[in-house]
Structures are given as C-alpha cells and as structure tokens.
Image (cartoon, rainbow, N blue to C red):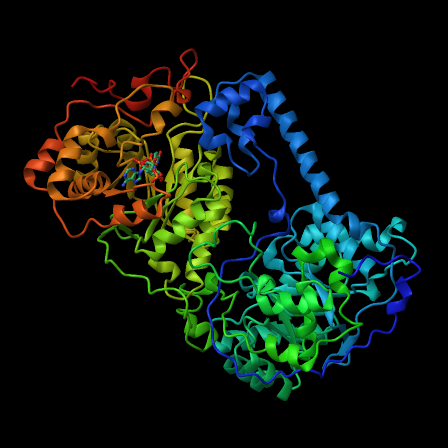
C-alpha cells in the first residue's frame, strides 16, 4: 500500500505522467441492470446510537417495553419518550445527554476515520487537466461529494480532498447537501488554518447539477445552487437526467445555453443520456455539451456511449467508478440473495491491486483514466484520499486493462428508477435508456396476480396481502422486503415509527433497479406518527418517508393512531387539523389515498363527517382472537376498505404491552384445521383473513415464512372451518399500548375513551 507522504516527499508528484491513451476502450458493451444504491459515507461507521445497554437505567426499562421504538439506529427517537413511556423531565434530560454522548462518539469515529487525511500537509500538485470543448480545462480526477450529508463529515471530506491536491469537486442538487458543501467551501476558501497552500475559488473546478424537479425554471435553480454553495459561478452545470420528451430537453438546454451566454456559468453538460438522446440534443443545440456524465466502471463499461462521445468531441466523465456496490460489511456475512457483486472485491481487481501494492479503488480509477475519461473519487473513499488520489505516477499494463475491460458481469448501478413509471416522466426503463433492461442473474419475479381492492376513485388498488414490517429489525428488513418482492408480494406496509423505512427503500430500489418490477407495481403504505399530527408537520413527515423509501409518491398514507401525546381534556392537534393536512398531501400528489388506523366506529363517524376526501382505508387489528367484527362491517357497509393487521395475533406484542395473553399461533383449533387440510398454521390464519373480504399484513423476516404466508391461493377454508375460527370465544386486543392512556389528565383516561367500547371478553 502506498503510505501517506511526508511534506518532503510531497512535491515528487509535481508532474504526474498521465497517459490517457493506453489501454483498450473498444471492448463490446453488454447492456445491464442495476444493484442497490450505494451507502452514504457515514453508513460504514458503526453508529453507537440507541444501543439499549448504553441507555440510562430508566430508559432501559422503557426499552424493554417498547424495543421496537427505541432500539433503532437512527436519531430522533428521544422526541416521543415523554408521552409514549411516561418518563419524567429528568429522565428525558438524562436520555438526551446520553444521546449527546453517543453523538460525540460518532464525531470521534468520523475524526478517527479522517485522521490520516487530516495529518497530510498541503500539496501543490493536482490532477492533470482535460481541455473541454469550450476551451476550459477540467481536472481528470475529482471528488464526488454528493453522498456526504453530515456537515462535519462533509467539511472534513472537502478539506482532506483539497489537501490531497484534488481540485475538482462535483456536487448534486438532488443530494440535498448543497448548503453543507457551501459551508465547507466557505471555510476552505477563507480560513488560514487550511495550511501553507491557500486554496482559492479559481483553483477549484466546481460542478453542479440541474435536478429533474427544477427544470421548469433553470435560471432560478442555478442561482439557488450558487447561493447554497456560496459561490459566484460554477465551472460546469450539468442537466442531471434527460427530460421526458426530446422537446422538453431541448427547451431546458436552451435555458442552460442562456446561462453560458449571460456569463453565469463556464460550461454546461448532460448526465445519464443515451446515444439517441445525445443525438437529438446535439442536433438541437447551439452550445454543444462540454461533458457527458455517465455511469462507467468495469461492471458497466458503457463503451458505446464512450465511443459516440469521442466521435462527437464530447468529453466523458464516468461516475460510480468503484462500481457503486459497497464492500460487504464483513467477509463472514453470507451474501444477500440477489445482491450484485462488489467490484472492489472482484478477484481481477484484487489481484491487480495486490500485484501493484495499491488499493482496489486506485485500480478502477486508473482504469477509467486510461480509457480517456475523467472520473470521480466516490465520497466513501475520501478518508483514504491520499492513497486513492495517487493514480498518476503509475499505469496499468495492456494485459491488466484487457482483464478489467472484459468482465462478463455488466449492469447499470444507477438506473434512474425514481424517474420511471410516472405519467410526467418515463413510462418504462426502455423510454429512459433506449435499450431493454438486461438481467441475467436473478430469477424472473412471479406475478401471482394477487387480488386487489380498488380504493374508490383514487386510482389506487390495494393488494389483498402485504408484508408487515413492524419489529423487523434493521439489518433484517431489507432482506425480508427483497425476498417478499422477488416472491410475488406487491404490497409493503411501512411506518415511520418502525424506524426501518430506509432499509425498506434500499430493498425496493434494489429490486426495482433490476428492471423487472416498476414502481407502480408495488403498493406502498406509510403512516403518520403521533408526534407529527400538527398541520405544519404532516407534509414534512410524508416527505421524510418518501425520502427514506426513495420514491416520489405513496399509494396510501394512514394516520397511525388517534393519539397525539398531548395531555388535557381534548385531543390536540385535532383529528380534523391532521386530516386536512393529509388531504393536502393527496392534492400535492405526494400520496394517492389516505386513511386511518386504530379508529373506532365513533371516531370514524366523526372523521367521515368532516372529511373532504374519502377515508379510503381503515387499518385495524383483526385475527381470530380479536375479530373486530362490528367495525369491519361498519366500514364495509360504507365503502371503506379494511386492512386487518397482526393476522397471527402479533405474538410478541403482549410482552411489549406488558400484559398476559394467549398465543393465537398455539390455538388448538387452528392447528387442527392446518393438520387436516395439510397447510401450516400461518397459511390458515392468512386465509381466514382474506376469506373475510379484508386485506391483511403478515409480518415475517424468515424467507421460508415470507414465501409460505403468500402461498394461500390454491386452497379454501370450508364454511365450517371459517365458522370455527370466527366463533372462538377468547377475544383480546394484542396491540393496545397502555402509554396511550393518561388516567389523570386525558384525553384518553381509560380503555373506553380510546376504543369507544368496553374491553372484549377473555372468556373461553
Ligand atoms: P403478526 O404478523 O401477527 O405476527 C408476526 C409474528 O409471527 C412474527 O414473530 C413472525 O416471526 C411470526 N410469523 C410470521 N409468519 C409465521 C408463520 N407462518 N408461522 C409462525 N409464525 C409466523 O404481527 P404484527 O407484526 O403485529 O402485524 C403484522 C403487520 O401489521 C405489522 O408488521 C405492521 O406492518 C402491521 N401493523 C400495523 C399496526 C397499526 O397500528 N397500524 C399495528 C400492528 C401491526 P418471523 O418474523 O420470525 O417469521
């Protein structure tokens, strides 16, 4: 491995011998599909947050009752401790200070990670430049800061990169971190502590992007980016994705040409364009794109686009140089089913790296440079920036280039799935990329034609069976959702409070990116948590879920509980206030249909009395140990679709809710039926639910049970078996959090206030 340079060594790289012409770029390209999104920079760090054993004593007691809520790796859980767990102010303060300590640990880990890069003194040498079409010069190697969102990490990454000699910084407005990068730029350009070599704005080539959402007002978007980045001009402004039609793209390009003509930007370019789209743009443009930014690495060579651009004098920058697939967290973990291979641990890359005593990252960056493209160091490599940037004093041999340029595995990592399937953008993968998706690795996804229920005139149709994700632990849920989607599930039930939506989003992105399922094939339910009922909080809550799930709309959004956590005689904010804000989310196109969970008939009557948009779905507990018949009937009579949750009686909820109850999965009547019809207990219970005319949400993280719970379409339960399961006298709510009651203040002092009915009989 190359070691970090001392200051006496540092000038030895002043004149890098860069040879962009060696190597063979003419390998035939195969088309491909993509893998999951890469992880952000901090994701590789071990987050210490919410390790239950690190929590103060009282919080740990609370954790034992609500592990689903507290044992998450994300931040923000503290905010609803006060009412969900009835903790005192003191307890909250102590938890928050523990949280702060954990944050400090995270910062320490970041600092440790950047230590080596920080210890390097400033270097004057930089990457060679490539002349752009406009006579401007751009360094052939830059750093991609798009994924670094944590302000401190972003500042460290930028400083480390600049110290290492990197003089090109690519940003993306879609990443939502421009302001953070702007702060880091401001610090880098003004503060003396940055070392002996002062970096000035004009020393750094800064590229920004025009995101699809901003194409309607190019100048405004550009100026906004400048303001966020705290810069007066950009060296390169790139249209991040083509528009849905050639005409729209041409209009946007015209507006970008005006930015050049007005002297606001130095060069303009495009990204993620296919050859037909480039051809159309070149035909319509006055100012030719200086740069075409496309995916390119040994697992997706993209040779045809490279060749086309070379023939048309458009410089190519390749992104995802390290393949986009993060290294496995541990060599000992079994590979995730269907996950794409990681380029950095590929045998060819590893063997070249070992032979040359360099890092695998350097091998693939050098490969990209020798093909004549410029490229970007991914943010995840910035902690090793000095080594990674050291690719100019050596070159790969012909045989090494050939081996790297002939890998069989070829698939796109960044397939733009978020743009596909909306009326306003690209109807299919083929419309975006002008080529069919290729997937030679995963088995075809079966279409089980699961029956759906139309939700009024919302355009949404809810599949009869959906995968539950409550209590599916981080680290397990991604795999569970991928397994479910690959085995025919088309409905995933999510909620912000399950603290796992990010992983559900990763799973969805991974499966959608294979090109065999489209966004509109999957029905996504999200839920508004109790702390977000105020009208000003609803839209941000929806957007947070959309971000985590990496989609631009939800099929269904539900008010999770008629509970807000306030103390006092009446519920505040009111259900009406919350519902109005949910209606606004429909009108903005963020969600297609809205509904509620855990409402009683009385509360539904009140809601339907004021609702302007229909209450499309009521999601409630429903299984043979809590049939909830009156409510199901009431909804069905009024065209409100019912989804019954906890089809297996939520076996682990009793302990969480601090109460004893029987276990439905052990009920002799269910076992007897299962044995007689040759099905398992889970299948009998799922079938009981769907045969009642409701949809249901079996939760599992076991591959075997995920698959078997959906395998219910080749048998029926007889009328007598239905009747047996529909007349069990033991009835008990399993999901009934005692924290929702505040006996001394209200709004819900006792069970009857919350549920508007007496507790069911547990006789039998
Ligand atoms: P559930 O689906 O009734 O039961 C899940 C439990 O059953 C897990 O322990 C699971 O373990 C096990 N299991 C799954 N399949 C099985 C099978 N075939 N045989 C034996 N055991 C099996 O519980 P739930 O999670 O309470 O409810 C399901 C979903 O409904 C939730 O995940 C959530 O999406 C939704 N829900 C919504 C609300 C609301 O307020 N809106 C409330 C509760 C639930 P493995 O994972 O190990 O298989």
Residue at position x 73%, y 68% in the image: 356
Which quadrant of the figure contains the N terminus?
bottom right
Q: Is residue 215 left or right of residue 616?
A: right
Which quadrant of the figure has residue 232? bottom right
Q: Is residue 754 left or right of residue 502?
A: left
Say which of 623 and 358 sits in front.
358
Which quadrant of the figure has residue 173? bottom right
Relative to 196, is 134 above or below?
below
Quarter of the rendered image showing ligand 1: top left
Question: How many numbered circles are shown?
Answer: 0
x then y, percent, for residue 199 = 86, 59
Residue at position x 53%, y 49% in the image: 332
Relative to 639, is 87 above or below?
above
Asked if residue 227 can be seen in this view, the reply is no
Say which of 45 and 537 sits in front.
45
x then y, percent, for residue 244 = 47, 71
Q: Is residue 103 left or right of residue 35?
A: right
x then y, percent, for residue 512 = 42, 61
């Amino acid at each position: 491995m190359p070691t970090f340079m001392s200051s006496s060594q540092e000038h030895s790289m002043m004149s890098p011998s860069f040879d962009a012409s060696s190597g063979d770029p003419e390998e035939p390209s195969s088309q491909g599909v993509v893998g999951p999104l890469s992880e952000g920079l901090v994701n590789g760090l071990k987050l210490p947050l919410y390790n239950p054993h690190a929590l103060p004593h009282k919080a740990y007691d609370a954790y034992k009752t609500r592990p689903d809520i507290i044992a998450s790796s994300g931040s923000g859980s503290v905010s609803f401790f006060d009412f969900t767990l009835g903790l005192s102010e003191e307890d909250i303060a102590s938890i928050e200070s523990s949280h702060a300590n954990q944050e400090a640990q995270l910062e320490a880990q970041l600092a440790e990670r950047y230590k080596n890069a920080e210890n390097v003194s400033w270097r004057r040498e930089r990457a060679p430049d490539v002349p752009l079409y406009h006579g401007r010069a751009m360094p052939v190697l830059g750093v991609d800061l798009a994924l670094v969102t944590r302000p401190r990490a972003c500042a460290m990454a930028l400083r480390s990169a600049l110290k290492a000699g990197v003089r090109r910084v690519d940003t993306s407005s879609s990443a939502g971190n421009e302001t953070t990068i702007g702060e880091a730029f401001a610090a880098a350009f003004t503060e003396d502590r940055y070392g002996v070599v002062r970096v000035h704005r004009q020393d750094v080539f800064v590229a920004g992007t025009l995101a699809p959402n901003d194409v309607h007002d190019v100048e405004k978007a550009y100026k906004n980016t400048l303001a966020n980045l705290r810069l007066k001009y950009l060296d390169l402004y790139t249209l991040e994705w083509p528009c849905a039609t050639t005409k729209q793209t041409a209009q946007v390009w015209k507006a970008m040409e005006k930015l050049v003509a007005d002297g606001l930007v130095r060069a303009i370019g495009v990204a993620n364009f296919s050859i037909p789209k480039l051809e159309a743009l070149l035909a319509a443009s006055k100012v030719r794109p200086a740069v075409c930014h496309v995916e390119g690495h040994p697992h997706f060579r993209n040779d045809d686009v490279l060749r086309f651009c070379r023939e048309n004098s458009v410089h190519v920058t390749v992104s995802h140089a390290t393949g986009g697939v993060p290294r496995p967290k541990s060599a000992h973990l079994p590979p995730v089913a269907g996950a794409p291979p990681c380029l950095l641990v590929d045998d060819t890359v590893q063997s070249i790296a070992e032979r040359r005593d360099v890092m695998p990252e350097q091998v693939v960056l050098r490969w990209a440079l020798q093909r004549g493209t410029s490229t970007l160091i991914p943010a995840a490599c910035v902690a090793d920036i000095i080594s990674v940037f050291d690719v100019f004093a050596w070159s790969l041999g012909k045989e090494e280039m050939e081996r790297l340029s002939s890998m069989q595995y070829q698939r796109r990592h960044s397939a733009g799935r978020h743009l596909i399937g909306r009326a306003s953008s690209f109807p299919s993968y083929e419309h975006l990329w002008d080529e069919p998706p290729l997937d030679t690795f995963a088995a075809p996804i079966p279409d089980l034609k699961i029956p759906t229920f139309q939700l009024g005139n919302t355009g949404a149709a809810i599949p009869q069976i959906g995968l539950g994700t409550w209590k599916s632990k981080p680290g397990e849920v991604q795999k569970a959702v991928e397994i479910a989607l690959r085995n025919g599930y088309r409905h995933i039930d999510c909620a912000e409070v399950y603290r796992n939506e990010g992983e559900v989003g990763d799973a969805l992105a991974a499966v959608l990116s294979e090109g065999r399922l489209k966004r509109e094939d999957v029905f996504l339910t999200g839920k508004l948590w109790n702390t977000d009922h105020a009208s000003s909080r609803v839209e941000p809550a929806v957007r947070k879920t959309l971000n985590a799930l990496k989609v631009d709309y939800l099929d269904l959004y539900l008010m999770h509980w008629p509970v807000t956590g306030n103390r006092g005689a009446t519920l505040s904010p009111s259900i009406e206030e919350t519902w109005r804000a949910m209606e606004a989310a429909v009108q903005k196109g963020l969600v297609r249909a809205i509904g509620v969970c855990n409402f009683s008939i009385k509360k539904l009557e009140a809601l339907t009395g004021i609702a302007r948009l229909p209450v499309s779905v009521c999601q409630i507990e429903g299984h043979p140990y809590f049939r909830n018949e009156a409510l199901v009937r009431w909804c069905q009579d009024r065209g409100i679709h019912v989804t019954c949750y906890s089809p297996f009686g939520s076996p682990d909820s009793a302990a969480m809710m601090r109460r004893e109850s029987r276990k439905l999965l052990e009920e002799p009547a269910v076992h007897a039926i299962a044995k007689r019809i040759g099905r398992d207990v889970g299948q009998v219970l799922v079938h009981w639910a769907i045969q009642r005319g409701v949809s249901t949400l079996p939760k599992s993280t076991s591959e075997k049970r995920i698959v078997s719970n959906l395998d219910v379409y080749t048998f029926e339960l007889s009328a007598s078996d239905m009747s047996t399961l529909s007349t069990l006298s033991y009835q008990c709510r399993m999901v009934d959090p005692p924290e929702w009651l505040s006996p001394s203040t209200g709004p819900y002092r006792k069970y009857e206030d919350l549920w508007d009915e007496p507790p069911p009989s547990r006789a039998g």
